[in-house]
Amino acid sequence: KLKACIFDLDGVIVDTAVYHYKAWKRLANQLGFDFTEEQNEELKGISRIDSLKIILNWDDVSKTDEEMQELATLKNTWYVDMITKMTPKEILPGAKEFLALVKANNYLTALGSASKNSETILKQIGLTHMFDALVDGNKVTKSKPNPEVFLVGAQELNVKPEECVVFEDAIAGVQAAKAGKMKAVGIGKADVLSEADLVIEGLFEMTIEKMENL
Ligand code: G6P
Ligand code: MG
């Protein structure tokens, strides 16, 4: 029986995926190259430094560790500029309602995000209080598809992995949930997120019944 819902943040609760894309694109352009929206799918759910490594690899650019830290920090400065202007209007359709619904039905809730900016974002959109546990990039070190972030979430909620369902927009995130022996609901396109137990367009489509039938 399911006891807990673990939510990714970027692209599930709020559309920060667009801001990540914009900031990475700006960085790539500054370095003299570009990447497509399709390539961007590979970055979703991946930690800041690992994302940078992937981007540099696309164009065979090599940088020292120190240069990479600087570039990642620069990207984050641009990203933070965008997210500190966010408002609750940017909560994705149905996200707040579904969080309220699962809580009303006595499920536990956790955040499971690779982001080190999750606290800022949750504060900006006013949803911090909706989570019983917050696990993000400040607490874990292994990037999705490693299940660490979700397993720590389950641990903090005091439930077994088998009792959790994960909501994810990233391929790596769906893989992380499955690697952790959890149910996975993909948010996005069914062909991209084919490894998920169910794919929906957004949390506005989700019901308790669909969750119980996974
Ligand atoms: C999420 C996003 C990624 C991002 C990562 C780290 O998983 O999907 O695109 O790179 O968080 O975010 P941060 O805010 O710490 O740079
Ligand atoms: Mg995401």
Image: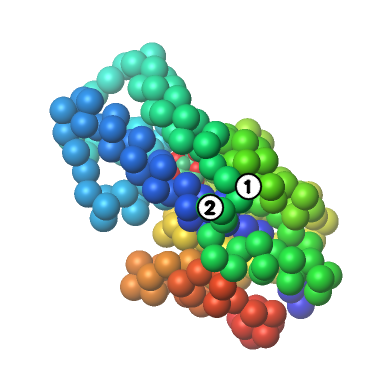
On-image quarter of the N terminus = bottom right
On screen, 202 above or below 41? below
| Figure quadrant of the C terminus | bottom right
Q: Position of residue 34 (x, y in %)?
A: 19, 38
Q: Report which residue position mark 2 lands on.
A: 90
What residue is shown at x 81% (from left), y 74% (from top)? 105
- Above/below status of 27 relative to 174: above
Q: Amino acid at mark 2?
A: Glu
Left or right: residue 27 compared with residue 33 = right
Residue 164 drawn at (x, y percent): 69, 66
Helix or strand or loop: what does disc 1 sit on? helix
Residue 58, compared with residue 207, is above or below; it is above
- Kindly state the secondary structure of the residue where label 2 is placed: helix
**Cα gap from disc 1 to disc 2, whole angstroms:** 7 Å
| Circle 1: residue type | Ile
The residue at the point 35 percent across, 43 percent down is 21
Residue 61 in the image: above or below residue 22 = above
Q: Earlier in the sequence, mark 1 or mark 2?
A: 2
Measured from the top left, where is residue 168 in percent x and y?
Answer: 52, 61
| Residue at position x 47%, y 30% in the image | 81
Q: Quadrant of residue 22?
A: top left
Residue 125 is labelled as 1
